[in-house]
Image: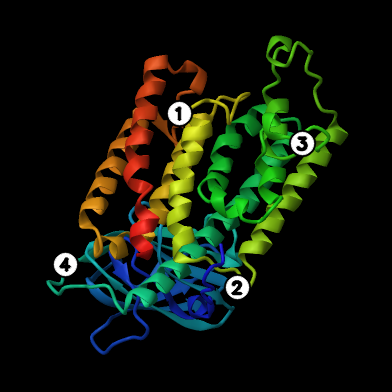
Amino acid sequence: MNKRAILLAAAAVAGTLALSGCVANASSSSDATKLTVDSTADDCVVSSGEAPSGTIAFTVSNSSDQVSEFYLLADDGLRIVGEVENVGPGVTRDLVVQAKPGDYFTVCKPGMVGDGVGRAAFTVTDSGKPVELAGDLQQQGEAAATNYVAYVKDQVAQLVPATQAFLDAYLAGDDETARSLYPTTRADYERIEPVAESFGDLDPEIDFREADVAEGDEWTGWHRIEKDLWPPAAADNGGTEYVALTPTERSYYADKLVANTQELYDAVHADDYTVTIDAISNGAIGLLEEVASGKITGEEEIWSHTDLWDFQANLEGARVAYEGVRDIVETKDADLVSQIDEQFSSLEDQLSAYGSLDSGFTYYNELTTAQVKDLADGVNALSEPLSQLTAVLVQ
């Protein structure tokens, strides 16, 4: 991932980038719209829920007793338009962004883990002034990398407590609750799976399927627990009756998953963790390949059949990575961007016919052959133009 290291010191000051119509801005200007943010233990109070397009300066004060973060999110609630982190108790820091008209969200994250608090809608109205990408291509790429790192850190910060909640239910023997939490908790991981894969053995220990494990290697992680929660019949288990894990064995695999998830958290929160701009675009491509090779075939969640939850998360992660570099690519090949935009929207609409992460999806084993083929065709239609993204980006 490290062809060209991009230092993250700027992220601690005012991490901003060209995401969903926002562009980097190194410093506040005299005509900026100035807003205040009070980050408390259980709320995130912004002085106004709207601002005109152009430069917006958020002055973030932390009145809680924990280190906090503030995010401006795009309309999907996932893409990070700008963030300021490491705001200590009693400390005030600034976030400056240049925003195009549109819908956004604001949220604070005391303790820097979990979903955050005080999430609220934020509207940028049209000031009539153009908002263009700032800086040269290298600066735009560095800004894109900064905010993609912030997105990865945010997803893993949500994964840690969500995994613990899932495992608490599993260890308590509350399998019904554990089964209900399994697919939604995994979404935080599936959105950034290529990042985990970049850390050597970490992804195999967290997410290998039984069929992927080499003979003699230990099988651990999500899918080991999945099999225990959805025990297969002997006919689906090589003709052997499945033997449920004992409480001691459950604790062993749960502890391993907690430790590996924490290791992932520590890795992406390390001071020297960086990405390159081509790694972002290749991540988008890789996530669609994940869908094609595992989710659309039903092989990923072979016991739970929750493949469409993973499909949705992979698609969201691919969209975030793509949007991070979209405006840069558009200056080089507007036709390609138009194709990718169209196919993303089409595939998202297709998948939404089967449910959502909030309401749940149709289980994979309930899909007809024709429905699987239609989804596969949609994946292929997006994969073709998306596969060209990196080549255009780095040319």
Residues at circles 3 and 4 in contact by the CB criterion of under 8 Å = no
User: Residue 18 appears at what percent x and percent y?
Assistant: 33, 67
Q: Which amino acid does label 4 sit on?
A: Asp
Report crowding for label 2: few under 14, some 14 to 19, many 20 or more residues within 10 A (C-alpha).
Answer: some
Q: Which residue is drawn at 33% across and 86% down?
A: 28
Q: In which quarter of the image is the C terminus?
A: bottom left
Residues at circles 4 and 2 in contact by the CB criterion of under 8 Å = no
Query: Left or right of 38: which side holds 49?
Result: left
User: Residue 100 appears at what percent x and percent y?
Assistant: 24, 67
The answer to whether residue 5 is above or below residue 348 is below
Q: Residue at x 75, y 35 (%)?
A: 214
Q: Which mark is first along the chain, 4 or 3?
A: 4
Q: Residue furthest bottom?
A: 30
Question: Cα distance, mark 3 to mark 4?
Answer: 54 Å
Comparing 327 with 35, the one in front is: 327
What mark, if any, has residue 361 been given in the picture? 1
Q: Which amino acid does label 2 sit on?
A: Val
Label 1: which secondary element: strand
Q: Which mark is first along the chain, 1 or 3?
A: 3
Residue 239 quadrant: top right
